[in-house]
């Protein structure tokens, strides 16, 4: 194999593919990038057995072939090359010679037949959605997705599509995030039919997909099979694929409190800032992730207090309140994550008792474009 590349184009493709390369695998080839130059264009592939990415780029293919090269080494080498063009030549023993200008590297490659078998990504059934809409759906729910929960479904976000309405849900036992929006979805399964599907995408997958959603007005195609989801960025020749999480998602509508008695409207940034200040004062043994604050809602204001062995902080934020007073405690990070994801100037808080979850919604909720966040309080000691 002998191929000439534009350094910037190759470097960009490799750095993007790194997100899907395994860093600790018993299979050496899984820590590599598959460089497939057997067609008219070069194909860069990264795959960690859960998620993968396939990127097509232009290249001057002098001799066709394929090879697997350690991803970290290849990425470092390409970044350091001095010239605008990079040449990669691979011999019959899979040793790769990488040259640019007067610089030349030789590193061991691997037989592409040793690379993990890729899933079939030819499926085209699903829908098209604007990148800005998908990014908004993901960023407003991903914060609530668990990372290493024993319940597999909690480690992913639920997607429900009914007609033009898309709902995404994340839950980790301490928080719930529900995002609902009517979007301009194009049905690629049946142009005349109504979309009706649900699936659970791993949180790690969505964390990488959202990084690719940087062209707001372009569309991304989402294709779904029984065990796999595929995100196609046609205008950039990128295909991102991932296994789905199997199982039934929690009945999230059932756990949202229905009979709140206290309603508070508050400036989002002010509330978030006060909670971030409260998180500074925390017990060292607990750590920042466990910092907590008491919120006392009364007389059209909220008093936020945090006390620990290292100190104390007190803040007051004006509110507009209906109903009686209430004092309730929260993990600061759980609450600030939700407020950060709200992405609106003011939020409406719905509360019942100090032991029932607080609901966070936009003050100007629209039935066709809304979010509902739930944060579980902690039991306060007197």
Image (cartoon, rainbow, N blue to C red):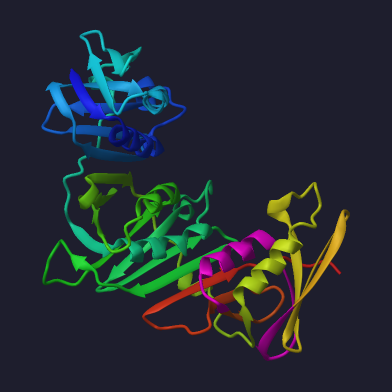
Does residue 273 appear left or right of residue 224 in this picture? right
Q: Which residues are magenta?
A: 317-346
Q: Nearer the viewer, residue 373 or 183?
A: 183
Position of 366 relative to 32 (above/below): below
Task: Assign the N terminus to one quadrant of the image.
Answer: top left
Residue 55 among those drawn in magenta: no
**Residue 325 colored in magenta in the image:** yes
- Picture quadrant of residue 38: top left
Residue 286 vertical placement versus 185 (above, below): above
Coordinates of residue 170 in the picture (x, y in percent): 47, 61
Figure quadrant of the C terminus: bottom right
Q: Position of residue 92 (x, y in %)?
A: 20, 9
In this rendering, position of residue 321 left or right of residue 241: right
Residue 76 on image: x %, y %: 42, 25
Residue beneath the point at 35% across and 64% down: 132
Q: Nearer the viewer, residue 248 or 268?
A: 268
């Amino acid at each position: 194999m002998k191929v000439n590349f534009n350094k910037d184009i190759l470097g960009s493709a490799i750095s993007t593919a790194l997100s899907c390369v395994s860093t600790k695998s018993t299979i050496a080839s899984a820590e590599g990038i598959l460089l497939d130059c057997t067609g008219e264009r070069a194909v860069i592939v990264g795959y960690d057995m859960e998620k993968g990415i396939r990127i097509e780029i232009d290249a001057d293919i002098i001799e066709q072939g394929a090879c697997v090269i350690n991803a970290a080494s290849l990425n470092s080498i390409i970044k350091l090359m001095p010239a605008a063009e990079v040449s990669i030549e691979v011999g019959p023993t899979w040793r790769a010679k990488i040259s640019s200008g007067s610089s030349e590297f030789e590193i061991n490659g691997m037989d592409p037949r040793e690379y993990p078998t890729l899933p079939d990504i030819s499926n085209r059934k699903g829908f098209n959605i604007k990148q800005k809409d998908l990014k908004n759906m993901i960023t407003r729910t991903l914060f609530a997705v668990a990372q290493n929960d024993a319940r597999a479904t909690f480690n992913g976000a639920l997607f429900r599509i009914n007609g033009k309405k898309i709902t995404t849900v994340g839950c980790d036992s301490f928080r719930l995030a529900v995002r609902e929006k009517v979007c301009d979805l194009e049905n690629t399964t049946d142009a005349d039919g109504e979309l009706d599907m649900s699936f659970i995408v791993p949180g790690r997958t969505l964390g990488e997909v959202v990084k690719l959603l940087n062209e707001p007005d372009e569309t991304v195609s989402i294709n779904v099979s029984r065990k796999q989801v595929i995100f196609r960025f046609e205008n950039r020749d990128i295909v991102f694929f991932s296994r789905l999480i199997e199982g039934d998602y929690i009945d999230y509508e059932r756990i949202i409190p229905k009979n709140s008695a206290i309603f508070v409207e508050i400036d989002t940034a002010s509330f978030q800032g006060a909670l971030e200040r409260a998180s500074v004062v925390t017990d060292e043994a607990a750590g920042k992730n466990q910092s907590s604050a008491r919120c006392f809602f009364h007389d059209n204001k909220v008093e936020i207090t945090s006390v620990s062995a290292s100190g104390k902080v007190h803040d007051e934020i004006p509110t507009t309140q209906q109903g009686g007073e209430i004092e309730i405690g929260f993990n600061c990070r759980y609450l600030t994550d939700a407020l950060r994801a709200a992405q609106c100037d003011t939020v409406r808080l719905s509360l019942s008792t100090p032991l029932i979850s607080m609901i966070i919604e936009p003050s100007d909720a629209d039935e066709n474009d809304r979010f509902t966040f739930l944060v579980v309080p902690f039991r306060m000691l007197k």
